[in-house]
Amino acid sequence: MVGGGQDAFIGAVHRMAAFLDGEIELVCGAFSSSESKSQTTGAALYLSPERAYASFEEMIVKEKALPEEARMDFVSIVTPNYLHAKPAMLALENGFHVLCEKPLALSYSEALTLRKMVKQSGLTFGLMHNYTGYPMVKEAKAIVKSGKIGPIRKVIAEYVQGWLAARIEESGQKQADWRTDPDKAGISCCVGDIGTHAENLAEYISGLKISELSADVSTFVKGRKLDDDASVLLRFDNGAKGVLFSSQIAVGEENELKVRIYGEKGSLEWLQSDPNSLLVKMEGEPVQIYRTGVDKSYLSKAALNATRLPGGHPEGYIESLANIYKEFARTIHGTKEGRKDEFDFPDIEDGVRGMRFIEAVIESGSKNAQWVKL
Amino acid sequence: MVGGGQDAFIGAVHRMAAFLDGEIELVCGAFSSSESKSQTTGAALYLSPERAYASFEEMIVKEKALPEEARMDFVSIVTPNYLHAKPAMLALENGFHVLCEKPLALSYSEALTLRKMVKQSGLTFGLMHNYTGYPMVKEAKAIVKSGKIGPIRKVIAEYVQGWLAARIEESGQKQADWRTDPDKAGISCCVGDIGTHAENLAEYISGLKISELSADVSTFVKGRKLDDDASVLLRFDNGAKGVLFSSQIAVGEENELKVRIYGEKGSLEWLQSDPNSLLVKMEGEPVQIYRTGVDKSYLSKAALNATRLPGGHPEGYIESLANIYKEFARTIHGTKEGRKDEFDFPDIEDGVRGMRFIEAVIESGSKNAQWVKL
Amino acid sequence: MVGGGQDAFIGAVHRMAAFLDGEIELVCGAFSSSESKSQTTGAALYLSPERAYASFEEMIVKEKALPEEARMDFVSIVTPNYLHAKPAMLALENGFHVLCEKPLALSYSEALTLRKMVKQSGLTFGLMHNYTGYPMVKEAKAIVKSGKIGPIRKVIAEYVQGWLAARIEESGQKQADWRTDPDKAGISCCVGDIGTHAENLAEYISGLKISELSADVSTFVKGRKLDDDASVLLRFDNGAKGVLFSSQIAVGEENELKVRIYGEKGSLEWLQSDPNSLLVKMEGEPVQIYRTGVDKSYLSKAALNATRLPGGHPEGYIESLANIYKEFARTIHGTKEGRKDEFDFPDIEDGVRGMRFIEAVIESGSKNAQWVKL
Amino acid sequence: MVGGGQDAFIGAVHRMAAFLDGEIELVCGAFSSSESKSQTTGAALYLSPERAYASFEEMIVKEKALPEEARMDFVSIVTPNYLHAKPAMLALENGFHVLCEKPLALSYSEALTLRKMVKQSGLTFGLMHNYTGYPMVKEAKAIVKSGKIGPIRKVIAEYVQGWLAARIEESGQKQADWRTDPDKAGISCCVGDIGTHAENLAEYISGLKISELSADVSTFVKGRKLDDDASVLLRFDNGAKGVLFSSQIAVGEENELKVRIYGEKGSLEWLQSDPNSLLVKMEGEPVQIYRTGVDKSYLSKAALNATRLPGGHPEGYIESLANIYKEFARTIHGTKEGRKDEFDFPDIEDGVRGMRFIEAVIESGSKNAQWVKL
């Protein structure tokens, strides 16, 4: 693991998710750029001191030097944005599979470079767009694909939070600090951090691609260097239209990610804060509430595979990441054993796509919401 | 009453709303352009045959000829859009107050003419933007005005329906027929019918004015002559940003009108299908559910005045219209008696504003979402 | 109208409900035992002074003396419990139909006497168990009757309020005052006021009859003379079991009336504070949300008849009473015209049943929850 | 681990919960009474073959024979009810701490014996009443304890499921099979399996003890040997009253565990299918929605300690078990290190209490709902 020191948020979540199914073990880490912090974190995680490394470079080099059966199988990257591409590249160069946090890189061009390396390496590359790991998101995708709701006309994707409504980055809140710092986060805060989740989800479920967009991008908090709010008009490759909005200044909102997909015959609605329900609305019929659960015979195979418990036993955020880890790990296993199963997790293409989206939104925003093609 | 024949939707609703408080009586009507239909409707409503008129012109002229204590007090106009301004003007010219359905007119310029006439007449003019009649909408406005949630940064207003997802106007559905016909509806179907409600509500609650907008306007149903979907980026006069989207092709949605207002210190959320609740979200505190009810001591006077029942006795759509009627009627009474109470109902200014909004959205839509100032 | 003076709650609601459809007119009233109050109320309701009577006796006698086309058609009784049976009897004796608030009487034996009089008179008698007027309640009844959910096994009916959690009857709250006074309310406060609504609804929807019950009845507020809480085990005539609980000390609850019906193949859930939705849960299928609306083709005729608006236009409490008034008035009309239509409103049998239920619960409560047969 | 073979439900959940925080490792197991099944499960869990034992007896004996640093720290028992007490006793006799599924034993007397052994051993004993592990349940307990809602008057606890509505035990459904078999489940199916969760939760949150109860116990499915439904009137030691109902024949319900607590000044409502919300209803104030999240400064320390993620990142069922494991494991650590921290997990007393409750309900049910003292 690269990153995930003791006061990080997402590193701990990754570890819980990876451990959940008992199939992945943490064997080493470069948890911090401070050697002593990395040591402390490693110790707290019951690692032997020699595998709590001072840097990702050291980790990759030393692990590679270990006998094959002892060395790590893959690298999990849970650092701020500016430290995604570098360790990913080094890992790939040294023959390690990579699971990386999103967004993929600091820029679209860096993303393209990384994609080239992934393709050349033949290694497995996963991107932690975890919301696609939820069973009801997979169900939504399966329903669209089945044709049940007909060709899609309209997509509404929203992701609103309130935690950056004040300038908390000034008071040492670590999560806020790097996300609002162009050197660490790249060209965008709000769009890069959450808007891209909404984009990824909209394209994942709908099976469509955004072809152009027009964005009004704002920084509401004075003195902040990056955006904290964006509203985007979308046009898709099949002629569908869309609205996407993301905000970090929506006071009082926790983490409201919601997607609505309207087809000619029916529509779908999914809300991350009630993740085990999917509303299916067919013309002229009562709304149906599809529910997560291994006992739900009406669900698609994709949804059932991503489900651990019977209905009524809420599965949550950690499980969504665990599903990405599971699919990723099984792909590595499958490849090892020469199998070519079709596993379902976001990969380098999602990463490249996300970077293109972020740049397009910021570009449109800087040009008074002119249309930008993707 | 002008319009509201037997297979009309909104005419019957107006009558129920007007009757609800026992303060308004239906005394005459020109319910249809067909004399026999007008007679049939009049008879069903227990009117004497001579006051079920064949046309609004006849109604206004003949009522004016009656002794003052016998003639109607005001005209209620519940016809399709193209028959709003004409009867309104004739009524004003003959000294009758007017309560008119929205949108006010067929065009912004017609609206301006009407406004001039209203001002010159000194008569009372009400516009049936009924959603502002809901107690929790009034509460939301009062909260914003109090400063509780701080200066507003972001507004999200949505109004989605699915009933026009197929070309039902071809099969004789009367409501669909006139709304999709440019001669009867004007330049817009979706924006004029429902988008303008979202606009009115957003400005009513926020106290802000939209200063410019950029709109992507669509007609998804083939062969339809007017828009059935629109997504709009908003900028407000105080620097706030917004998103407004309205759709009539959102299959499976009933009548989902929702407004979210984000201030610097808190936010508000109201949804028409759960009209007796208002979510109040203050930074760092649990979300609060404000509820309609004459027994709710924390509510503003404006909300309490618009409420008839104790909490837990759901009030609905008809009551929202009844509140407009009540405020309108009390204004007329008050004026008669020389009082100048401050009643709260949408008026000619809302109507002019709405027409400007509709034209701006359609103009922006026709120019590939260029910004248009209001 | 008997009762319904200016600070009464339910009288005003009855008037709004009766006026709503424009088919019922208020022609006279004995609104209060104080002549001057009755006059004031009458004047506020635009009645001529001679038809605002000083007592129900005067009203009935004098109205009878009027020519048939001028006199009132029926008497609406909206007084506290102790003034239900007397005016009802006098009205029946003088040939007037009666619509009466629940509970029917002060005791089961009084209820039986009243039933005998109704039968002998041949007149129409309605009882305002308004919750059966909601469209989705009628839909629930229709679904059960259709056999869709199979034979019923379990019924859960609850009605919880918090408004009597403190001894507000001491501070002059008029609604609390008479409800907690044995002379005016009879032998029960909580069970008579709301428990009986839950009982009526459970039997109405399920089509079953309670055969015996065991009740734990409490008075939590010190000094109060009547019950303010009751929990009841139910057994039905088909072998089904049930739980019914009602409370007026459930602080923070508004008016939460909820019924769940579990059959062998499916189940139903309805909640009065979200009255336009009915949850239908069939074994192995996603939950379906049935919704009020004249445009819902899947609804039963009974539900559609009780609906005024398309889906998404919330109908509420007043409409539920209006539906009782409408069915009651149409029955009178039908009888006049010699028709024998089947209208659907609670009648004298519901009233007798309710009184038996109240007495059985109080009896069981006084015997430490012994089983009492109905 | 004792039990938890490959087609068991709860065993896998326990493993996920135990692994979640990376502090507990599975080192051995007697996963099945079939040696080969135990081996297969062990292999799938990456255990070495010699630590996948053929029986719990073998496991306990052989583990004890290992050097202290190699042997297991505690035994987790996830078997059907009839195999709870025996392995627990053997583990205690051999010096191992125990975490056991509920209900504790097959009978109250067996439970008492076990309690004696726990006390004599000085070892740590945990019981998997997992619902007390949810942060919002802990918050509810903290609020009650703080006095905020005043002395408690009424408790409503319900747990309804529909999965046993048909006789699925006949068709080889393993979960249904043992739960409806008196030899394996004991004297109760529904009350033992889920009713006792409702009881535990009600007492945990309220801090009260049930002093007596009256129960109507049913077996709706023909041929079934144990109860599948029970409705219970409760009386608490402080004079509060209550209703508890549990059902496994409530078709269409998943796993609906809900608790409402009414105090003199306020009330609380928690629903397991929306576990991250707690409704707090104070007299005269808007309802407040307390929410899980490490960023919620208004939460109690108990709730925050049981929370892993910021608000809006749903935590679910597995986390609730993980919290029990975490508190249990920390107690063992603490004891080892001589610390006497106060950790919060259900223990032997909850187990004894639960068995007493089950027996009392079944006894009352067999005596036509006579009151039985606990």
Image (tube, coloured by chain):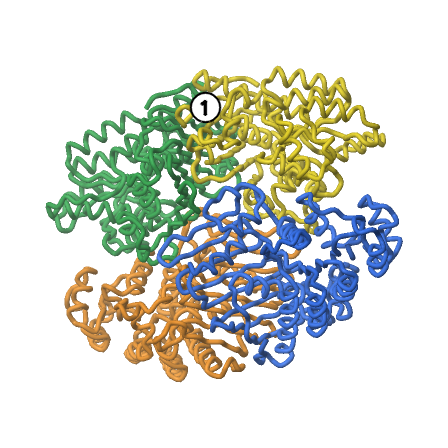
Chain colours: A orange, B blue, C yellow, D green
Q: Is residue A134 visible?
A: yes
Mark 1 crowd level (few <14, some 14–19, many ≥20, 10 Å Cα): many
Q: Is residue B141 above or below residue A360?
A: above
Quadrant of the rendered structure where residue D208 is? top left
> Can you give x and y, in whole percent of width and height, for residue D311 in the image?
36, 57
Please report the residue visible at 66 percent of the width from the left and 44 percent of the height from the top.
B21
Residue C189 located left or right of residue A100? right
View extreme (front): residue: B338
Mark 1 = which residue?
C217
Q: Amino acid at mark 1?
A: Val
Q: Is residue D345 above or below residue C63?
A: below
Instruction: Tell me where residue D372 sits by quadrant.
Output: top left
**Along the horizontal axis of the image, is A40 left or right of A142?**
left
| x then y, percent, for residue D106 | 32, 29
Instruction: Name the secondary structure under disc 1.
Output: strand
Give the position of the C terminus of chain D as an image quadrant: top left
Locate residue C212, reporting x and y percent: 54, 20
Determine the chain carrying the residue at label 1. Answer: C
Query: Position of C97 compared to A274: left or right?
Result: right
Q: Nearer the viewer, residue B313 or C185?
A: C185
Residue occupying image coordinates x 53% and y 33%: C157
Q: Position of residue B200 (x, y in %)?
A: 59, 64
Q: Nearer the viewer, residue D11 or B141?
A: B141
Q: Quadrant of the N terminus of chain D?
A: top left
Q: Nearer the viewer, residue B77 or B273?
A: B77
Q: Is residue A182 above or below residue B37?
A: below
Task: Tell which of C202 and C142 is nearer to you.
Answer: C202
| Residue that appears at 42% across and 78% down | A355
Instruction: Tally the numbered discs.
Output: 1
Left or right side of D151 for D53? left
Asked if residue D37 can be seen in this view, the reply is no
Q: Residue at x 19, y 45 (%)?
A: D331
